[in-house]
Image: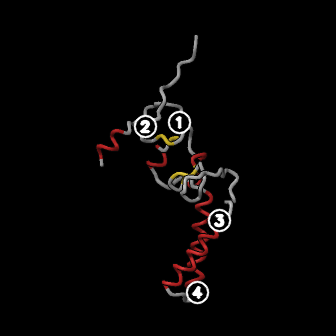
């Protein structure tokens, strides 16, 4: 006798590359360990940059120019993340596990259609 398998959930609105976004969508940002480590490092660098710019009374025009240069350097280096896998998507941080500031590897695996299954068609109807 073979095992019963769930139907795939590729067309579920909570499904993303084999992971389930349901819990994240209930409480966005609540689980800090699901956040992308590279994005958190960049956010910390930006906060530090703003504190320094304020301390040195740098004007708004120059702040933008300085941050652009700083950010280009940040993006140009390989991220300091053990889960990082390069992706040529063109979207920083250029990692195949990155999705909306989340690291998909932290989310639970999608095992197929479950009680939370919601077809994507409903997303199109709601907008």
Q: Residues within 10 Å of mark 4 (few under 14, many from 20)?
A: few
Residue 55: mark in rendering: 4
Mark nearest the camera among 4 and 3 is: 3
Residue at disc 3, secondary structure: helix
Side (left or right) of 27 relative to 69: left
Marks 3/2: CA–CA distance:
35 Å
> Which mark is first along the chain, 3 or 4?
4
- Please indicate whether residue 37 sits to the left or right of residue 7 in the image: right
Q: Earlier in the sequence, mark 3 or mark 2?
A: 2
Question: Which of the numbered marks, if any, corresponds to residue 12?
Answer: 2
Q: Nearer the viewer, mark 4 or mark 2?
A: 2
Residue behind mark 1 = 110
Query: SS for tag 4?
Result: helix
The colour scheme used here is secondary structure
> Image height check: is 36 above or below 62?
above
- Name the residue that disc number 3 marks: 76
Report, in whole angstroms, how far the alpha carbon at label 2 lies from the one at label 1.
Answer: 10 Å
User: Which residue is at a point 68% across and 56% down the rendered structure image?
Assistant: 81
Q: Is residue 124 left or right of residue 102?
A: left
Alpha-carbon span between mark 4 and mark 3: 27 Å
Upstream in the sequence, badge 4 or badge 1? 4
Farthest residue to the bottom: give it.
57
The answer to which quarter of the image holds residue 54 is: bottom right
Q: Residue 68 location in percent, x, y?
A: 56, 74
Q: How many marks?
A: 4
Q: Give SS at disc 2.
A: loop
Disc 2, disc 1: CB below 8 Å? Answer: yes
Q: How crowded is the residue under tag 2: few (<14 C-alpha within 10 Å), some, or many (20+)? A: many
Q: Nearer the viewer, residue 4 or 127?
A: 127
For the point 38% across and 39% down, the residue is 120
Viewport quadrant of the N terminus: top right
Q: Are marks 4 and 1 in contact (CB under 8 Å)?
A: no
């Amino acid at each position: 006798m073979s095992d019963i398998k769930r139907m795939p959930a590729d067309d579920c609105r909570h499904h993303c590359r084999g992971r389930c976004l349901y819990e994240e969508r209930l409480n966005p940002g609540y689980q800090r360990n699901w956040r992308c480590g590279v994005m958190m490092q960049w956010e910390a660098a930006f906060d530090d940059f703003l504190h320094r710019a304020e301390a040195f009374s740098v004007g708004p025009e120059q702040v933008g120019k300085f941050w652009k240069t700083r950010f280009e350097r940040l993006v140009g280096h390989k991220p300091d993340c053990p889960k990082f896998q390069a992706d040529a998507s063109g979207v920083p941080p250029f990692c195949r596990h990155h999705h909306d500031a989340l690291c998909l590897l932290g989310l639970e695996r999608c095992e197929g259609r479950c009680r939370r299954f919601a077809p994507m068609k409903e997303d199109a109807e709601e907008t």
